[in-house]
């Protein structure tokens, strides 16, 4: 049975990180909120001591995912195409998505930095939803921001996250 204290911690922690990133998005006009932040924040506040929740795994995971997604977007000649949502799915889009997900998964496995939300990040890029270098830098900065917010929140509420656990 879930307890009210943990539920409140998760409720507040999840909202705080997203509100902070959302405020930065409004202030900058850049995509500081994107779908895979949700599962990352949920891991941080629901399971702060899990290796997949550690700042190390989170940061490495999303950086690898952003790079793999962009590399496959370029390699498949899709960098200047509309996103899969606008253009539909093509053979090259499938290659980009499958390749970026496979590379992200194996690199994170080899680095002992498993962070499942990174799988969503690499698909977001390889499917063209975030596709410019500026958007990728903003996404990386956003991951760093919510990770710091969640780390501080967990620490302040007595649920310290390991900083660099593998």
Image: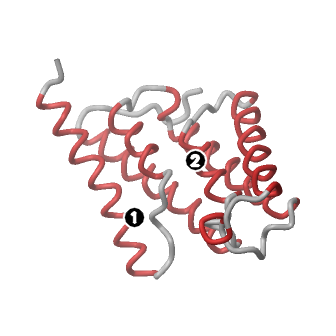
How many numbered discs?
2
Q: Could you tell whether 146 is left or right of 1 in the image?
A: right
In this view, 22 is above or below 38:
below
Instruction: Check the picture and name the quadrant holding the C terminus.
Output: top right
* Residue 57 image position (x, y, % from top left): 58, 37
Colour scheme of the picture: secondary structure
* Residue 107 image position (x, y, % from top left): 76, 36
- Mark number, residue 21: 1
Dot placed on the residue nearer the N-terminal end, 1 or 2: 1
Residue at the spot 71% in from the left edge and 57% down from the top edge = 126
Q: Could you tell whether 165 is left or right of 77 in the image?
A: left
* Residue 104 image position (x, y, % from top left): 72, 41
Residue at the spot 71% in from the left edge and 28% down from the top edge = 109
Q: Around disc 1, counting alpha carbons within 10 Å, would you say few (fewer than 14), some (14 to 19), or many (20 or more)? A: many
In this view, 67 is above or below 164:
below
In the picture of the structure, the residue carrying the numbered disc 2 is 120
In this view, 93 is above or below 113:
below
Q: Which is more toward the observer, 34 or 22?
A: 34
Residue at the spot 50% in from the left edge and 51% down from the top edge = 36
Residue at the spot 60% in from the left edge and 51% down from the top edge = 121
Q: Which is more toward the observer, 147 or 15?
A: 15
Front: mark 1 or 2: 2
Specify the quadrant of the image occupied by residue 127: bottom right
Q: Which is more toward the observer, 37 or 97?
A: 97
Secondary structure beneath dot 2 equals helix
In this view, 113 is above or below 139:
above
Secondary structure beneath dot 1 equals helix
């Amino acid at each position: 049975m879930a307890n009210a204290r943990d539920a409140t911690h998760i409720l507040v922690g999840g909202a705080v990180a997203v509100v902070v990133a959302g405020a930065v998005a409004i202030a900058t006009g850049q995509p500081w909120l994107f779908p895979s932040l949700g599962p990352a924040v949920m891991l941080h506040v629901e399971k702060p001591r899990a290796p997949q929740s550690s700042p190390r795994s989170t940061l490495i995971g999303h950086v690898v995912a952003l790079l793999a997604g962009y590399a496959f977007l370029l390699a498949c000649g899709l960098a200047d195409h509309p996103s899969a949502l606008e253009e539909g799915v093509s053979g090259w889009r499938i290659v980009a998505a499958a390749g970026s997900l496979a590379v992200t998964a194996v690199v994170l496995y080899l680095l002992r930095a498993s962070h499942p939300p990174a799988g969503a990040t690499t698909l977001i890029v390889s499917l063209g939803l975030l596709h410019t270098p500026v958007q990728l830098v903003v996404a990386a900065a956003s991951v760093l921001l919510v990770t710091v917010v969640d780390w501080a929140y967990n620490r302040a509420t007595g649920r310290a996250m390991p900083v660099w656990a593998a």
